[in-house]
Amino acid sequence: MLDRRLERLERELMLVARCSVLTPRDRKGHGTAAQEGGEPPEPAAAAEARTEPCTPTRLDRSGYLLLSRLDAEGAMSIGQLADALQLDVSTVNRQTGALLRAGLVERIPDPDGGLARKLRVTAQGADRMAAERTCRQTDLSRLLESWPPEDVARLEDVLTRFNREVERQEGRAWPREPGEAGRPPE
């Protein structure tokens, strides 16, 4: 029955969104929740397998998303970021404020001569984003290590297709590399 399938699919998407492997949580700047006792500690084998680049303070979900968007699209105003991410300007202002204070983004004059100042990723921000991406890919690799390669490829294709459909319906495409997996938007 389609309704039951949609119930299960909605539940699984909710569970993916809370997945700490993909989105580590930071509790008031004291490291991830797992490091602070907010979640059960990792099994010893998993903790030992963690590579060195994943031990510094991790970027939270909003920081990683904002840096990724700025990296993919280039300098953007707070209004442009809010529109691209479908968030309130006040929310993006608060989130980018944290990135500014951390030195991960900087305000610059609009390269196109507009009045609004824009934000761009700093060298430090690019380094932190690259380290976070490596951590997330390492965590995913560990999570999927028992999966056959064709299942990993199928998961990538289906998620890409799903995200492209969301982007098409919302009219907000995420910048992608040419030839990226999945079907192109229609």
Image: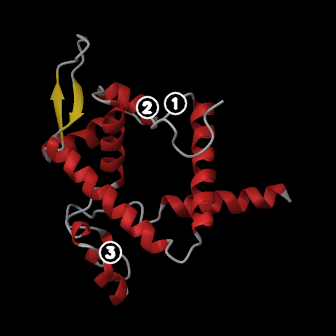
The amino acid type of the residue labelled 2 equals: Ala
Disc 3 on helix, strand or loop? helix
From mark 3 to mark 2, how far is it between C-alphas?
A: 30 Å
**Which quadrant holds residue 98?**
top left
Crowd band around label 2 with a 10 angstrom C-alpha radius: few (<14), some (14–19), many (20+): some
x and y, in percent, of residue 87 in the image: 42, 36
The amino acid type of the residue labelled 1 equals: Arg
Q: Tell me the residue at 23%/61% (across/down).
A: 28
x and y, in percent, of residue 37 in the image: 30, 79
Contact? badges 3 and 2 (CB < 8 Å): no
Numbered disc in front, either 1 or 3: 1
Residue, disc 1: 172
Crowd band around label 3 with a 10 angstrom C-alpha radius: few (<14), some (14–19), many (20+): some
Mark found first going from the N terminus, 1 or 2: 2
Question: Visible in this render: residue 20?
Answer: no
Residue, disc 3: 34
Mark found first going from the N terminus, 1 or 3: 3
Q: Is residue 138 above or below residue 109?
A: below
Disc 1 on helix, strand or loop? loop
Q: Tell me the residue at 43%/29% (across/down).
A: 83
Residue, disc 2: 84
From mark 1 to mark 2, how far is it between C-alphas?
A: 6 Å
From mark 1 to mark 3, how far is it between C-alphas?
A: 33 Å
Contact? badges 1 and 3 (CB < 8 Å): no
